[in-house]
Every structure is written in C-alpha cells, then in structure tokens.
Image (spheres, helix red, strand yellow):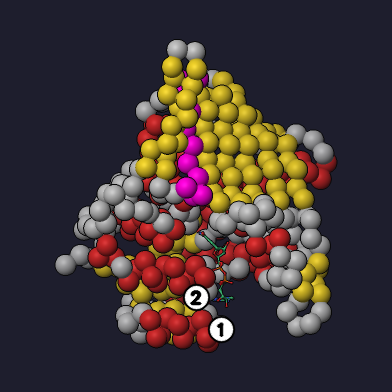
C-alpha cells in the first residue's frame, strides 16, 4: 500500500473539487507516490461542502470555519482554493498551524500580502509550501522543458507565453469575485492567469529585467445576477512586453493574459524561438508538440502527436490523449513527491517564484499607469 497524507481542503469550489477528483483517482499513477487523503473540508457555503460529503468517502470533518479545520491534529496538509482577498489570512494561518500547504495563485492579493505569506513560509522551513500551476505538466510542454534544459534552442530569439479565455465576451455573464478588484485584486486578469504564463520562463532561469504593460478594462459593468448591474473594475486583458536575460544576453519575452480573446477556451501556450531550433505547445492542440527542423537555410514547422507520456507515469497507454484533469493529477504528484522529500524532475511553483511573480505584476501595473517601461 502507498503511504497517504491526510489533507484538509479550504475552499470547496471549482478547484477544490478538481483536487478531490485527482485524489480519488490516485491509482492512476504507477510510481508509488504518497497519496493525498481528504479527511476534512471547510467552506462557508454548505452546498459546496455537501458535494465533498457526498462524493469523497474519506471526509470525516465538515466546517464553515477554517480555524476548526486547522485545529485538528489529523490534518497534516492543506489545499487552499479561496478568493484572492483571503489568501494572506488563511495561508498564514495554515502555515503557522504547522500544516504543509498547496495554495492557489496569485498567492496573496497583492505584493504586501505575498510578502506576509513568505514571512510565514520563512518561519517554517520544515513545511513544503507551493503554489498551484498545472499546465507545464502537459506532455507536450514537458518535451519543450526538456529541450530548454538540454539547451537545444541555442541562443534564444524570443519567448511568448499566454493564457486566453473568452467567456467574458458574453456581456450577459454576471459579475463574480474574479471580476472585482476588492476580491480579485488590482492585478485583474494578471492575478488570475499570470502565474500560469510564468512557471516555465521562471524555472528556465530567464530573468525578467523590465516590463512595458498594456492593460485593458474593456467591459466596466456586468449584470449583478439580481436583475441590476454592478461595476466590473478588473483588467480584462494584459500584454506584458519584457526584456529577459539569460547567459549574458537579453531577448524579448511577451506574456499575455486575456479574459477577452475571441474563440479561446482555456487556451494556454508557450512558444520558444531559438537560433538552433524553435518549439511550441498549446492546449488548443494538447496532443501535439510543434518544433522546427532546418533544411539548408530554411526551417520547417513539424507536428508530432506526443500522446500520453507524462512526467509521472500512469496506467494510461502512451497512444492515448492527455487533458486538463490529467495535468492536475501530475501537478499533485509533483507536490506529493516534494512533500515526501523526493526530487520532482519539474517541481511546483515555489514561494520564491510567487515573489518574482508579484514583483513583475506590480511593475506591470505601474508601467501601465505611467505609460513607461519599469525595471524590476
Ligand atoms: N490552478 C488553476 O487552474 C485555477 C483555476 C481557477 C481558479 N484558481 C484559483 O483557485 C482559487 C479559487 O478559485 P475557484 O475558481 O476555485 O473559485 P470558486 O469561487 O469556485 O471557489 C472558491 C470557494 O471558496 C469558498 N470560500 C469563500 N470564503 C471562504 C472562507 N472564508 N473559508 C473557506 N472557503 C471560503 C467559496 O464559498 C467558494 O466555494 C483562486 O485563488 C483562483 O485564482 C486556479
């Protein structure tokens, strides 16, 4: 039998349920990785808790108060997926209660909140604290990451990474906490989507030196869900043009996060152009890895069907397709390995990387406000 770790879930919404589902299909992984076992859940919304009570047989404790969950000795680790305005208070409380934490991005509503969370992390070096980011675990992206590690691209010409949604194109979509500065934060779409674009570039060691940002609030009002309208004051789209540095030279890096990208459905991509070769991965074509081959002076873009060859082996045959919930399972495998003290070939987004993320997003806000390039 695999060893298991008892988890509490704080925030039983969209992402809380994804974790529950991943924990319930741990048998999918073949590597003997310790399994998360959800023993307690917390959400002030009784309906959200009920889903867990009905679907997760290991749940013994249900509460609306996270303090009650953290007081339990049988909870060893916590997954926390709550609105951004609650990250600082709850993440600090989890860490100071001596529990391991996988928190959600942006890991604090703003830079000051993130700094306070990192202070709590520093007080507890014995705990494994990480931030969720699952897209790099698609096999096509893992292939691209291996090529970065093998220096296959040669001198980097340019890097682009982005995350596009389009559901906000529906102007009748009611406002929610993700579309209000008070609960989502002043970063807007960057706070919601930015970490996803940063994980691979930061891990590659590409150091962001400065940023010029163009932020757009395209829709300023939305239905409030009660027959009226409410302000929608967050940035819908953000384009960050950065200078990044590696091996003593600079190259342009463009990071885009958009809630209003016509036709996009959770479209996450990364493209690396290099002098030796180039490659790209997009969740629009999740089974594919694109790369260039050179013929004399010309380059041809090739597409290989990469299949299901994830970082952490599973029971799924190599010819089958890989999807979002598989990426979530892989991210959790990485976290559980890191928690058990084993190295993960590609680990989860670290607290230090969340600090870099906040310094970039903070600089992007200033850049847009003042209409100039801002150094980090
Ligand atoms: N990794 C990803 O791909 C991904 C995707 C979506 C959201 N997220 C992140 O996950 C987090 C949650 O987003 P979501 O989409 O699951 O939101 P959601 O609105 O679906 O769920 C949030 C839950 O938190 C609960 N909550 C509110 N106050 C609480 C409190 N005091 N204690 C406990 N629970 C409380 C709400 O009742 C709700 O059920 C955010 O940080 C968001 O940025 C990550």
Instruction: Determine which residue is flagged by label 1.
Output: 45
How packed mark 2 is, by other alpha carbons closer than 10 Å (few <14, some 14-19, many 20 or more), is many
Q: Pinpoint residue 217: horizontal percent, then vertical percent.
A: 78, 55
The magenta span reads 275-285
Relative to 270, is 257 on the left or the right?
right
Relative to 345, is 251 on the left or the right?
right
Instruction: Determine which residue is flagged by label 2.
Output: 12
In terms of secondary structure, where does tag 1 sit? loop
What's the mark number on residue 216?
none
| Cβ–Cβ under 8 Å for marks 2 and 1 | yes
- 306, 342: nearer the viewer: 306
Q: Quadrant of residue 36?
A: bottom left
Q: Pinpoint residue 363: horizontal percent, then vertical percent.
A: 70, 43
Ligand 1 picture quarter: bottom right
Relative to 247, is 305 on the left or the right?
left
The verdict on label 1 being within 8 Å of ligand 1 is yes
Residue 278 belongs to the span the image colors magenta: yes
Task: Check the image and name the residue furthest to the left.
Answer: 1
Q: Is residue 26 above or below residue 125?
A: below
Q: Is residue 176 above or below residue 163?
A: below
Task: Give the distance between the C-alpha atoms of the residues marked 2 and 1, in whole angstroms.
Answer: 8 Å
């Amino acid at each position: 039998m695999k060893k298991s770790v008892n988890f509490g879930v704080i925030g039983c919404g969209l992402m809380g349920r994804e974790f529950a589902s991943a924990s319930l299909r741990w048998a999918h992984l073949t590597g003997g990785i310790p399994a998360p076992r959800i023993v307690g859940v917390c959400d002030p919304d009784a309906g959200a808790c009920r889903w867990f009570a009905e679907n997760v047989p290991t749940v013994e404790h249900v509460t609306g108060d996270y303090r009650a969950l953290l007081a339990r000795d049988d909870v060893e680790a916590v997954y926390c997926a709550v609105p951004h305005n609650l990250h600082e208070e709850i993440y600090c409380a989890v860490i100071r209660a001596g529990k391991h934490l996988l928190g959600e991005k942006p890991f604090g509503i703003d830079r000051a909140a993130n700094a306070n969370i990192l202070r709590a992390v520093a007080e507890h070096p014995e705990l494994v604290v990480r931030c969720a980011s699952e897209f790099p675990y698609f096999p096509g992206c893992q292939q691209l990451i291996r090529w970065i590690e093998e220096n296959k691209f040669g001198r980097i010409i340019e890097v682009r990474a982005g995350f596009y949604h389009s559901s906000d194109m529906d102007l009748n979509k009611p406002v929610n906490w993700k579309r209000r500065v008070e609960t989502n934060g002043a970063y807007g779409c960057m706070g919601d989507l930015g970490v996803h674009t940063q994980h691979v570039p930061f891990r590659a060691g590409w150091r962001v030196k400065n940023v010029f940002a163009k932020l757009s609030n395209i829709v300023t009002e939305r239905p409030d869900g009660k027959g009226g309208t409410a302000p929608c004051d967050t940035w819908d789209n953000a384009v960050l043009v950065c200078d990044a540095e590696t091996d003593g030279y600079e190259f342009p890096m463009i990071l885009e996060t958009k809630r209003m990208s016509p036709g996009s459905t959770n479209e996450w991509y990364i493209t690396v152009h290099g002098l030796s070769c180039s490659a790209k991965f997009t969740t629009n074509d999740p089974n594919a890895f694109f790369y260039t081959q050179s013929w004399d002076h010309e380059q041809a873009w090739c597409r290989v069907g990469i299949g299901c060859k994830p970082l952490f082996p599973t029971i799924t045959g190599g010819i089958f397709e890989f999807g979002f919930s598989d990426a979530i399972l892989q991210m959790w495998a990485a976290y559980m390995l890191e928690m058990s003290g084993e190295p993960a070939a590609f680990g989860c987004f670290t607290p230090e990387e969340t600090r870099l993320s906040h310094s970039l997003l903070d600089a992007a806000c200033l850049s847009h406000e003042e209409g100039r390039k801002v150094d980090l």
